[in-house]
Amino acid sequence: MFNFFKKAVSGIAPKRQKSITKELLEDILLESDVSYDQVEEIIYYMPPGDEVKRADVRRVLLAYFVDVEKERDIDAKPYVDLIFGINGAGKTTTIGKLAYNYRVTGNSVMLAAADTFRAAAIAQLETWAKNIKVQIVATKQGHDPSAVAYDAITSATAKDIDHVIIDTAGRLHTGQNLSKELQKIVRICGKAKSGAPHRKILILDGTQGNSAINQAKSFNEIVSIDALIITKLDGTAKGGALFTIASELKKPIIYVGVGENRADLIKFNKEDFVDSLLDEIFENEG
């Protein structure tokens, strides 16, 4: 499922082994885009001695990931996801993929084109809605995005739709006006339906390293992030950035984007993710 690590590991450890040196583990983690400070911490928590085994590494790496808590108001209908992030992170495409995931599991979906700053964003979301056969609430460029969110939630409630996914304008985490706008959208969602938005999801470009972490910390101060989706991890050796992101932010990663197709949004599983790295390094146990 996760194939981020083949490229990073193959040039350093072409042959899988029962145990490896700590020095080799350090090289592999750095090549996989784990931050230097975190690599040092991982090595610190290894058992004494020069060699480490799969079970030792697995135990430490798994500890960095926050488990997804039971989603509050999981039975709410509609269940409202509010999506945000900076321009270029893959936000609107991710919304289309998330809507597709809901659709293929038998759930009805309504999209809200609350990125009214760019006409192209509205058109892009309308194209997604048409292609995956879901409903959409959209308006013209420049209209109040909070009103779009409100209309989508009330319309979905009236139509007994399972999920609402709200797009928002791409914004820098340092932009005060757009930050206030995002806070307003959160408030208006709560007026449209008590408890909404049920998840506030930040989209992060996984190739951005420390920049992505700084973005997330700032967004969390603005609206209190519930979960993360990490995009653009296909075709790179950047998978190790997820360890650093999870460690720094203490927020659950719920999906990973690994391609442009509508099915290329993979539900994140920490065991599968860690094992995908270890399978490239160690012989199978047992």
Image: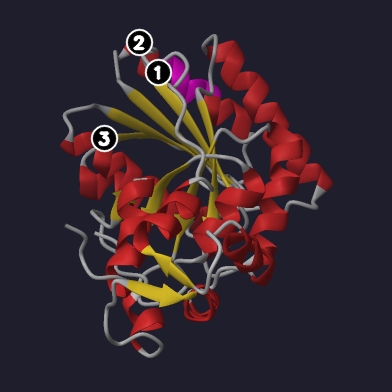
Mark 2: which amino acid? Ala
Residue 230 position in % (x across, y down): 47, 55
Name the chief secondary structure element in magenta: helix
Give the image location of residue 198, x and y in percent.
50, 22
Which residue is located at x 26 percent, y 35 percent?
102
Measured Cα–Cα span from mark 2 to mark 1: 5 Å
Asked if residue 154 lies in the magenta stretch, the reply is: yes
Measured in 3D between alpha carbons, the distance from the residue under mark 2 to the one under mark 3, in whole angstroms, is 19 Å
Q: Of circles 3 and 1, which is in front?
A: 3
- Visible in this render: residue 259? no
Left or right of 124 on screen, residue 266: left
- The span shown in magenta is 150-155
- Helix, strand or loop at label 1? It is helix
Tag 3 secondary structure: helix
Q: Residue at label 1? A: 155
CB contact under 8 Å: marks 2 and 1: yes
Front residue (pair 244, 77): 244
Badge number at residue 102: 3
Quarter residue 234 falls in: bottom left
Question: Is 277 above or below relative to 23?
Answer: above
Left or right placement of residue 68 versus residue 209 in this view: left
- Quadrant occupied by the N terminus: bottom left
Residue drawn at the location 45% of the way across and 32% of the way down: 68
